[in-house]
Amino acid sequence: MAGTKEGGKKAALKNLQRDPNFYAKIGARGGKNGTTGGFAANPELARIAGAKGGRISRRRKVEA
């Protein structure tokens, strides 16, 4: 039954029986790993990337 919807529900129930906070703990781990990086942290990087994308999108199609 592994890999089916029913099997997934059974596994979820089993995880919650072992530890009622199982999914909360997993979510907390993910949240702690996250650092608001990327473009939110570096607007100059966003500007450069946007300029590159704009240049590429305005190129003419190469006819072979």
Image (tube, helix red, strand yellow):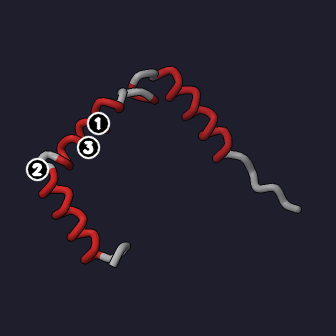
Location of the N terminus (image quadrant): bottom left
Residue type, label 3? Ile
Could you tell me which residue is drawn at 45 percent across and 23 percent down? 43
Q: Residue at x 64, y 47 (%)?
A: 57
Distance in Å between CA atoms under marks 3 and 1: 5 Å
Distance between the alpha carbons at the discs numbered 3 and 2: 12 Å
**Of helix, strand and loop, which one carries label 2?**
loop
Tell me the crowding category of disc 1: few under 14, some 14 to 19, or many 20 or more residues within 10 angstroms, Cα based: few
Q: 4 and 49: which one is in front?
A: 4
Helix, strand or loop status at disc 1: helix
User: Looking at the rendered structure, which numbered label has been put on residue 13?
Assistant: none
Nearer to us in this view, 1 or 61: 1
Identify the residue position indicated by label 1 in the image.
29
The residue tagged 3 is 26
Residue shown at 15%/53% (left/top)? 18
Residue 28, how many percent across, how many down?
Answer: 23, 37
Q: CA distance from mark 1 to mark 2?
A: 16 Å
Coordinates of residue 2 in the picture (x, y in percent): 36, 74
Residue 20 bears which disc, if any? 2
- Secondary structure of the residue carrying tag 3 is helix
Mark sitting earlier along the chain (1/2): 2
Crowd tier of the residue under label 3, counting other residues whose Cα lies within 10 Å: few below 14, some 14–19, many 20 or above: few
Judged from this view, the residue extending furthest toward the right is: 64
For the residues labelled 3 and 2, say whether their Cβ atoms are less than 8 Å apart.
no
Mark 3 and mark 1 residues within 8 Å of each other at the beta carbon = yes
Give how far across and how far down residue 27 sits, in percent.
24, 42
